[in-house]
Amino acid sequence: MMMAGDALALDAAERALRSEQVIVLPTDTVYGLAALPASDRAIDRIYALKGRPLSMPIAFLVASREQVESLAGPVSPEADRLMVAFWPGPLTVVLAERGGDGTVGVRCPDHEFVRSLAARVGPLAVTSANRHGAPTPAAAFDAASSLDGEVDLVVDGGSCPGTASTVVNGTDPSLPVLREGPIRREQVVAAALR
């Protein structure tokens, strides 16, 4: 286990991810289980560690708005206003997948360690570090221990708040809230109208 504030933690996390490993890391919401999206092996491990159905997609954490372009097609003005208003922060926006027919959930977290890591390696495939359907523990060790198997690296960032991000469908102009979290529906509507 490494501490997020340790200068070596960022290097260790980068090495692990580039080696197709799976790591637990802190975010501004809950502890996350992360891998590089290009590694099918690592993504398969995420699903197995969580016991998550393959039908449930994994969202991406990005370092900046610019990284969204590598994942998603054109972003509507309404969705763009949400990103400006709430990023970095606890808002996941579902967008049209770049070069595909599906969608992709994208978030820029308000956590320096995660953004620095994504700046180094590109967008991160991240889901909460817990068994599917169970609450996410607030402590790094507990989050890692809740999984069905061991992860390759645990980065401890102290206690995480424990409320998953708000998820908004940015492909629909009415911006329906798919999961309410720290950002309420009224805030989404107000930001979209700016």
Image: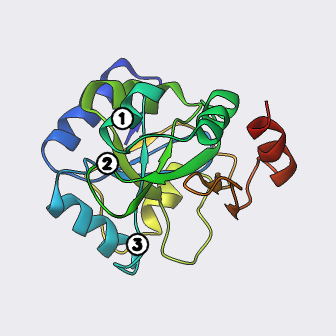
The amino acid at mark 1 is: Glu
Give the spatial CA distance, label 1 vs label 3.
28 Å
Which of the two labelled residues, at mark 1 and mark 3, occupies the earlier sequence position?
3
Helix, strand or loop status at disc 2: loop
Q: What residue is drawn where x is 50% and y is 67%?
A: 130
Q: What residue is drawn where x is 53% and y is 36%?
A: 157
The amino acid at mark 3 is: Lys
Residue 178, percent from left and from top: 66, 65
The tag on residue 69 is: 1
Give the spatial CA distance, label 2 vs label 1.
8 Å
Q: Is residue 104 above or below residue 25?
A: below
The amino acid at mark 2 is: Arg
Of residues 44 and 156, the one nearer the viewer is 44
Residue 2, percent from left and from top: 38, 36
184 relative to 110 in the view: left or right? right
Residue at label 2? 98
Helix, strand or loop status at disc 3: helix
